[in-house]
Image (tube, rainbow, N blue to C red):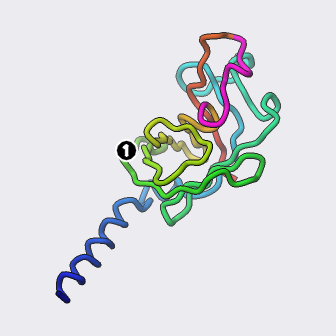
Amino acid sequence: MKYAVCALFVLSLTACNQDSLEGTYNDFEGKFDWFVSSSQPGPLNVGDPSKLVDANKTGYTAEIEINDKSHILFYRDGFLLTDNAFVIREKSSHAGGASLTLELKGSTGNLSLQNNELRLQLNQDTLSVDAYPFSSIDDESNYLNDDEAEINGNFFIRE
């Protein structure tokens, strides 16, 4: 019985380590402020302002914080919307950055995330997020003139 309890303890420690942000992925830890969302394909291109949405258009700010306890926190106008533990589903590194797919655990409150998944890409101090703030708490059609336009990148800068 004592060995079974010890084995379960060691197994739980090992399972927790799988989802910690180590090495290259440690750079994801920190707080990031939203500065723009874009409906243009490919990397962020500020050439066409009609395809960009920012706090000046929406009237609110958004922040994301990723901590060393494998939690991600979402803020709007400085107020906490939700704090979720996460499990890393996919990760990859590349020149200049890294990518993660997270599965958020528990209720995400008013965030609308497909399968509770969030994709993040970090290049130096710029974090790209697939679904926050668009389209998890707001609808891009409120700000973009083109009926077929969809936000394909939400960009945050490290505080």
Work out whether residue 85 or residue 123 is closer to the camera in this orientation and state it.
85
Q: Is residue 100 left or right of residue 28?
A: left
Residue at x-position 69% and y-position 54%: 80
> Where is residue 47, by image quadrant?
top right
Q: Is residue 123 left or right of residue 36?
A: left
Residue 136 image point, x, y percent: 59, 36
**What residue is disc 1 on?**
92
User: Magenta region: which residues?
Assistant: 135-145
Question: Where is 101 relative to 55, above or below?
Answer: below
Residue 156 image point, x, y percent: 65, 42
Residue 143 image point, x, y percent: 74, 21
Work out whether residue 55 or residue 114 is closer to the camera in this orientation and state it.
114
Residue 24 image point, x, y percent: 44, 54
Look at the numbered disc 1 and give the secondary structure of its residue: strand
Check disc 1 and give the amino acid type: Ser
* Number of on-image labels: 1
Residue at x-position 47% and y-position 40%: 119
Work out whether residue 126 or residue 31 is closer to the camera in this orientation and state it.
31
